[in-house]
Image (cartoon, rainbow, N blue to C red):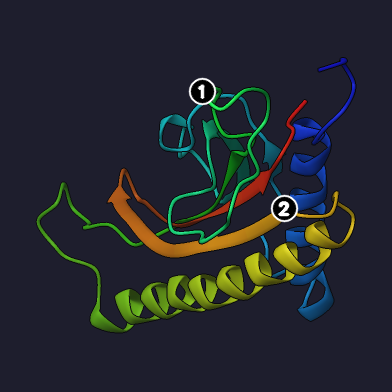
Amino acid sequence: MPPGRGLDVAGIACRVFDTIVAHYDALDPDLLPPRRVIAPGESRSIAWDCDQFVLTFSGVGNGAAPGLQVQPRRQGNPISSMGLRHAVYVAQIVRCVPEPDDAGQRPPKPETLREAALHLMADAGLLSQALIDVCTQVGDGLPKGTHCQAGAVETLGPLGGFAAVEGSIAVTAGLLV
Protein backbone atom coordinates (compact mmCIF):
# COMPACT_ATOMS: atom_id res chain seq x y z
CA MET A 1 0.00 0.00 0.00
CA PRO A 2 1.51 3.35 -0.98
CA PRO A 3 2.04 5.87 1.85
CA GLY A 4 -0.40 8.73 2.25
CA ARG A 5 -3.54 6.71 1.50
CA GLY A 6 -6.19 5.96 4.03
CA LEU A 7 -7.58 7.57 7.10
CA ASP A 8 -5.79 10.56 8.63
CA VAL A 9 -5.78 9.49 12.30
CA ALA A 10 -4.35 12.80 13.59
CA GLY A 11 -6.64 14.88 11.37
CA ILE A 12 -9.69 12.96 12.59
CA ALA A 13 -8.62 13.66 16.19
CA CYS A 14 -8.73 17.38 15.39
CA ARG A 15 -12.17 17.02 13.79
CA VAL A 16 -13.51 15.05 16.77
CA PHE A 17 -12.12 17.65 19.18
CA ASP A 18 -13.45 20.63 17.21
CA THR A 19 -16.89 19.04 16.79
CA ILE A 20 -17.28 18.39 20.52
CA VAL A 21 -16.16 21.94 21.36
CA ALA A 22 -18.57 23.37 18.76
CA HIS A 23 -21.43 21.26 20.15
CA TYR A 24 -20.92 22.69 23.63
CA ASP A 25 -20.23 26.24 22.39
CA ALA A 26 -23.46 26.26 20.36
CA LEU A 27 -25.38 25.69 23.59
CA ASP A 28 -23.30 27.95 25.84
CA PRO A 29 -19.59 28.80 25.46
CA ASP A 30 -19.17 28.48 29.23
CA LEU A 31 -20.49 24.89 29.45
CA LEU A 32 -17.19 23.24 28.55
CA PRO A 33 -14.20 23.97 30.82
CA PRO A 34 -11.83 26.60 29.42
CA ARG A 35 -8.90 24.15 29.47
CA ARG A 36 -9.40 22.13 26.27
CA VAL A 37 -6.57 19.90 25.04
CA ILE A 38 -5.69 17.02 22.76
CA ALA A 39 -3.31 15.16 25.03
CA PRO A 40 -0.76 12.42 24.42
CA GLY A 41 -1.14 9.13 26.21
CA GLU A 42 -3.91 7.11 27.77
CA SER A 43 -6.96 9.09 28.94
CA ARG A 44 -7.09 7.75 32.50
CA SER A 45 -3.45 8.68 33.09
CA ILE A 46 -4.00 12.38 32.34
CA ALA A 47 -3.66 14.48 35.51
CA TRP A 48 -6.90 15.66 37.07
CA ASP A 49 -5.68 18.98 38.41
CA CYS A 50 -8.33 21.35 37.06
CA ASP A 51 -11.65 21.39 35.20
CA GLN A 52 -10.81 20.34 31.65
CA PHE A 53 -11.90 18.75 28.39
CA VAL A 54 -9.33 16.25 27.11
CA LEU A 55 -9.25 14.18 23.93
CA THR A 56 -6.81 11.28 23.68
CA PHE A 57 -6.08 8.58 21.13
CA SER A 58 -6.58 5.07 22.45
CA GLY A 59 -5.10 3.18 19.50
CA VAL A 60 -5.63 1.32 16.24
CA GLY A 61 -7.04 -2.20 16.15
CA ASN A 62 -7.51 -4.85 13.49
CA GLY A 63 -10.94 -5.45 12.05
CA ALA A 64 -14.09 -3.46 12.64
CA ALA A 65 -14.58 -1.73 15.98
CA PRO A 66 -16.03 -4.12 18.58
CA GLY A 67 -19.79 -4.37 18.20
CA LEU A 68 -19.84 -2.99 14.67
CA GLN A 69 -21.48 -5.38 12.19
CA VAL A 70 -19.57 -4.80 8.95
CA GLN A 71 -18.68 -7.23 6.19
CA PRO A 72 -14.99 -6.58 5.53
CA ARG A 73 -13.52 -7.06 2.11
CA ARG A 74 -10.46 -9.25 1.86
CA GLN A 75 -7.16 -7.89 0.62
CA GLY A 76 -4.49 -9.96 -1.03
CA ASN A 77 -4.56 -13.74 -1.09
CA PRO A 78 -7.13 -15.75 0.87
CA ILE A 79 -4.83 -16.18 3.88
CA SER A 80 -4.17 -12.45 4.40
CA SER A 81 -5.86 -10.51 7.17
CA MET A 82 -9.02 -8.51 6.70
CA GLY A 83 -8.57 -5.04 5.29
CA LEU A 84 -10.53 -3.25 8.02
CA ARG A 85 -8.99 -1.52 10.99
CA HIS A 86 -10.37 0.87 13.59
CA ALA A 87 -9.07 3.91 15.45
CA VAL A 88 -10.43 4.81 18.89
CA TYR A 89 -10.54 8.29 20.45
CA VAL A 90 -11.51 9.04 24.05
CA ALA A 91 -13.19 12.28 25.20
CA GLN A 92 -13.11 13.14 28.89
CA ILE A 93 -14.66 16.07 30.77
CA VAL A 94 -13.22 16.58 34.25
CA ARG A 95 -14.94 18.67 36.92
CA CYS A 96 -14.09 19.70 40.46
CA VAL A 97 -16.36 18.02 43.02
CA PRO A 98 -16.93 18.80 46.70
CA GLU A 99 -14.69 17.16 49.27
CA PRO A 100 -14.99 16.80 53.04
CA ASP A 101 -13.89 19.77 55.18
CA ASP A 102 -11.80 19.85 58.35
CA ALA A 103 -9.35 17.09 57.41
CA GLY A 104 -12.14 14.81 56.20
CA GLN A 105 -14.25 15.11 59.33
CA ARG A 106 -17.18 17.07 57.87
CA PRO A 107 -18.75 15.81 54.62
CA PRO A 108 -20.01 18.23 51.98
CA LYS A 109 -23.58 19.46 52.35
CA PRO A 110 -26.15 17.35 50.48
CA GLU A 111 -27.24 20.27 48.29
CA THR A 112 -23.60 20.89 47.29
CA LEU A 113 -23.16 17.22 46.36
CA ARG A 114 -26.45 17.26 44.46
CA GLU A 115 -25.41 20.30 42.42
CA ALA A 116 -22.07 18.70 41.48
CA ALA A 117 -23.76 15.38 40.62
CA LEU A 118 -26.39 17.02 38.41
CA HIS A 119 -23.68 19.02 36.62
CA LEU A 120 -21.76 15.78 35.92
CA MET A 121 -24.95 14.07 34.73
CA ALA A 122 -25.67 16.99 32.40
CA ASP A 123 -22.13 16.62 31.02
CA ALA A 124 -22.79 12.92 30.38
CA GLY A 125 -25.92 13.71 28.36
CA LEU A 126 -24.24 16.53 26.42
CA LEU A 127 -21.13 14.47 25.72
CA SER A 128 -23.22 11.55 24.51
CA GLN A 129 -25.04 13.80 22.04
CA ALA A 130 -21.76 15.46 21.01
CA LEU A 131 -20.32 12.02 20.21
CA ILE A 132 -23.34 11.28 18.00
CA ASP A 133 -22.77 14.62 16.25
CA VAL A 134 -19.11 13.69 15.76
CA CYS A 135 -20.11 10.43 14.06
CA THR A 136 -22.42 12.31 11.71
CA GLN A 137 -19.92 15.03 10.83
CA VAL A 138 -16.70 13.00 10.80
CA GLY A 139 -18.32 10.17 8.84
CA ASP A 140 -19.42 12.56 6.10
CA GLY A 141 -15.85 13.44 5.13
CA LEU A 142 -14.35 9.95 5.16
CA PRO A 143 -13.91 7.38 2.37
CA LYS A 144 -16.89 5.25 1.33
CA GLY A 145 -17.33 2.28 3.64
CA THR A 146 -15.99 4.10 6.70
CA HIS A 147 -18.06 3.75 9.85
CA CYS A 148 -18.06 5.87 12.99
CA GLN A 149 -19.50 4.54 16.22
CA ALA A 150 -20.10 6.45 19.46
CA GLY A 151 -19.43 4.47 22.62
CA ALA A 152 -21.12 4.67 25.99
CA VAL A 153 -20.43 7.58 28.31
CA GLU A 154 -19.45 6.58 31.83
CA THR A 155 -18.48 8.37 35.02
CA LEU A 156 -15.06 8.19 36.65
CA GLY A 157 -14.00 9.15 40.16
CA PRO A 158 -14.27 11.03 42.38
CA LEU A 159 -10.56 11.16 42.97
CA GLY A 160 -8.59 14.00 44.53
CA GLY A 161 -11.51 16.41 44.39
CA PHE A 162 -12.38 15.68 40.76
CA ALA A 163 -14.79 13.45 38.84
CA ALA A 164 -15.21 12.95 35.10
CA VAL A 165 -17.40 11.66 32.32
CA GLU A 166 -15.72 9.77 29.52
CA GLY A 167 -16.89 8.51 26.15
CA SER A 168 -15.28 7.08 23.06
CA ILE A 169 -15.55 7.19 19.29
CA ALA A 170 -14.40 4.33 17.08
CA VAL A 171 -13.77 4.95 13.39
CA THR A 172 -13.59 1.82 11.19
CA ALA A 173 -12.08 2.00 7.71
CA GLY A 174 -10.30 -0.08 5.12
CA LEU A 175 -7.10 1.94 5.31
CA LEU A 176 -5.53 3.92 8.14
CA VAL A 177 -2.54 6.23 7.65
Q: Position of residue 75 (x, y in %)?
A: 67, 30
CB contact under 8 Å: marks 1 and 2:
no
Please give the residue where the numbered disc 2 appears in the rendered image: 34
Q: Quadrant of residue 67?
A: bottom left
Instruction: Name the residue: 86% across, 62% down.
Output: 140
The secondary structure type at the circle numbered 1 is loop
Q: Which numbered disc, 1 or 2, marks the residue closer to the eye? A: 1
Vertical placement of residue 80 versus 114, above or below: above
| Disc on the earlier residue, 1 or 2 | 2
* Left or right: 102, with 142 as reference point: left
Vertical placement of residue 39 versus 93, above or below: above
Q: Residues within 10 Å of mark 2 (few under 14, many from 20)?
A: few
Instruction: Name the residue: 76% across, 54% down.
Output: 145
Q: Residues within 10 Å of mark 1 (few under 14, many from 20)?
A: few
* Left or right: 137, with 127 as reference point: right
Residue 162: mark = none
Q: Position of residue 27 (x, y in %)?
A: 77, 80
Q: Amino acid at mark 2?
A: Pro
Real-space Cα separation, disc 1 to disc 2, in angstroms? 50 Å
Please give the residue where the numbered disc 1 appears in the rendered image: 79
Q: Amino acid at mark 1?
A: Ile
Instruction: Name the residue: 49% across, 61% down.
Output: 151
- Which image quadrant: the C terminus? top right
Vertical placement of residue 81 versus 54, above or below: above
